[in-house]
Each structure stands twice: as C-alpha cells, then as structure tokens.
Amino acid sequence: MSKRLGEVLIISEELLKLYSPLSKNVDVDKIYPFLHLAQPYFIEPILGTALLQELQTQVESGEITEENKALILKVAPVLANYACYLAMRSLTYSVTDKSITLEKSENSQPISEKELGEYILSLKTLCEMHKEVLIKYLCRCALTYPLWRPQSDECNCEKYIPTDGSADVDRAFTVYFPNKKKGCDKCDRDVFIKKY
C-alpha cells in the first residue's frame, strides 16, 4: 500500500498488477498519479468519505480488520482498472521536451489508434462491471460497514436487491454473493435480500 503524492492508496502494487491488465514489467511509477486520481474520483463516491478514510487509516497503520481486508479485495479491481483506463494513453505515448512520441519495444508491435480506442472502451466496460460487483457487495454487507455513506446515486441498493412486488430482480446477485461470503458473515443479509 502506498502513500505517494500525499494520499494513502488503499491498494498495493501487488493488487494493482493482480487485478489490472498491466504486465509484470510495467513501471508502476507511471501509474501512481492515475491511482491518486482514480481513488477520490471513482472510489470515494462509492464508499463515501468516512469509509475511505477508515480504510486509509488502517492501511497506513498496517492494522486492517478482516472485514476491511475483504472490502479492499472488492475495491482493488475497480481502482486498478480505472487507474489503467486513465493511464492508457500515457502508457502508449511519451511526452519529452521536444515532442510526443509513441512508445515502442524491440520485440512488440504497437497497436493502431483505432485498436487503442477499442481497447480503452473495453477497459471502461470492465471497470463498470467491477464497480457494480463492489456496489452489490456493499449493499449485501451494509451492516458490516456502518461508515458506508455513498455519495453516488448509482449506489442505490434497491437497484440490486429485490423487494416484494419488484419485477426487476437481478438473478445474478446470488452468483456474486453466495450466503456466508467471507468478509460479511456478521451482517444480517435477510434484512437486505429476499432468498429464492
């Protein structure tokens, strides 16, 4: 976990590389500015300021609760992929004092501008999917995270949790969050979800 550019990042370099399309030999120093942008811009609206600050405090002290470790593992794919999404053009091009150049390697072929655009779009779709999984997890385990106060309208648990009379039931919900999922065993899921 890192504290570069003044703000504590809640994911480590290992989690960044595990959950993102970055190869193992990418210089993560090129990604850190984008992590520092993605965390407040994409993660804080989902977690809320209080929960994000709790995670940052625990990460900085090295004493992370089991529940927050589980949450960080749900946040990691979202944060890692959004950082890559933001960094993609910077990883493709280098800005020097004389010009902007395309990064090349001896044993690899750069993709076309069109292919890059398509790749960035697919990366954004992946980000949205991971974000939805995170929101579903938080909805499912809301009692475990009393500091969770999302700032985003998309964190409406009613969207993901069927209620009586609801015609819009997300049947995939139980695929992502089977009963007794580690990290939220202490919450009363029956309050939040109707069992099928």
Image (cartoon, helix red, strand yellow):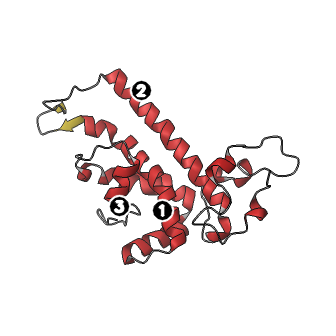
Q: Residue at position x 36%, y 42% from top?
A: 21
Q: Nearer the viewer, residue 137 or 175?
A: 175
Q: Residue at position x 87%, y 51% from top?
A: 164
- On screen, residue 97 above or below 28: above
Query: How many other residues sit within 10 Å of disc 2, few (<14), some (14-19) or many (≥20)?
Result: few
**Could you tell which of marks 2 and 1 lies nearer the N-terminus?**
1
Question: Which percent across, then down, holds residue 122?
Answer: 46, 32
Choose mark 2 or mark 3, whichever is in front. Answer: 3
**Could you tell which of marks 2 and 3 lies nearer the N-terminus?**
3
Query: How many other residues sit within 10 Å of disc 1, few (<14), some (14-19) or many (≥20)?
Result: many
**Label 3 is placed on what type of residue?**
Ser
Residue 72 - label: 1
Choose mark 2 or mark 1, whichever is in front. Answer: 1
Q: Secondary structure at mark 1?
A: helix
- On screen, residue 60 above or below 169: below
Q: Secondary structure at mark 2?
A: helix
- On screen, residue 76 above or below 20: below
Q: Nearer the viewer, residue 103 or 186?
A: 186
Judging by the rendered image, the residue that carries numbered circle 3 is 12
Question: Which percent across, then down, holds residue 136?
Answer: 63, 53
Distance between mark 1 and mark 3 Cα atoms: 10 Å
